[in-house]
């Protein structure tokens, strides 16, 4: 699954100055997580991946929160969040 690489990617992009990346990745991971919640997963391989995705989502949320608290969110993202 792709989600385990995304927290590291987001941290690297923010370090490089791309402060809009956490919002985009957070939206993607939130949608992906919501889709997996609709499935009836028992104790199988997909359930383990789903549980890991929850922690990846939390890490990306933390990075986005840090960027937002520091006022580094681009203006267009602030307008989108207000709508």
Image (cartoon, helix red, strand yellow):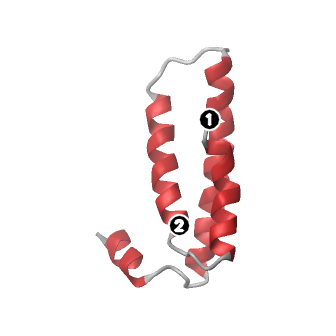
Q: Earlier in the sequence, mark 1 or mark 2?
A: 1
Q: Is residue 63 above or below residue 58?
A: below
Q: Residues within 10 Å of mark 2 (few under 14, many from 20)?
A: some
The residue sitting at 40% across, 74% down in the picture is 77
Label 1 crowd (10 A; few <14 / some 14-19 / many >=20): few
Percent across and percent down for residue 80 are 33, 71
**Which of 8 and 65 lies nearest the eye of the viewer?**
8
Horizontally, residue 6 falls left or right of residue 39, namely right
Q: Quadrant location of the C terminus?
A: bottom left
Q: Which residue is mark 2?
A: 21
Name the outermost residue toward the front: 16
Label 1 SS: loop
Position of residue 40 measured from the top left corner of the image (x, y, whole percent): 50, 17
Quadrant in which the N terminus appears: top right
- Residue that mark 1 sits on: 1
Q: Residue 72: percent from the left, percent from the top? A: 55, 83
- Residue 67 drawn above or below residue 32: below
């Amino acid at each position: 699954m792709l989600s385990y690489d995304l927290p590291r990617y987001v941290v690297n992009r923010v370090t490089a100055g791309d402060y809009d990346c956490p919002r985009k990745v957070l939206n993607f991971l939130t949608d992906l997580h919501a889709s997996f919640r609709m499935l009836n997963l028992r104790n199988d391989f997909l359930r383990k991946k789903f549980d890991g995705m929850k922690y990846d989502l939390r890490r990306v949320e933390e990075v986005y929160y840090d960027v937002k608290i520091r006022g580094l969110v681009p203006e267009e993202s602030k307008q989108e969040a207000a709508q």
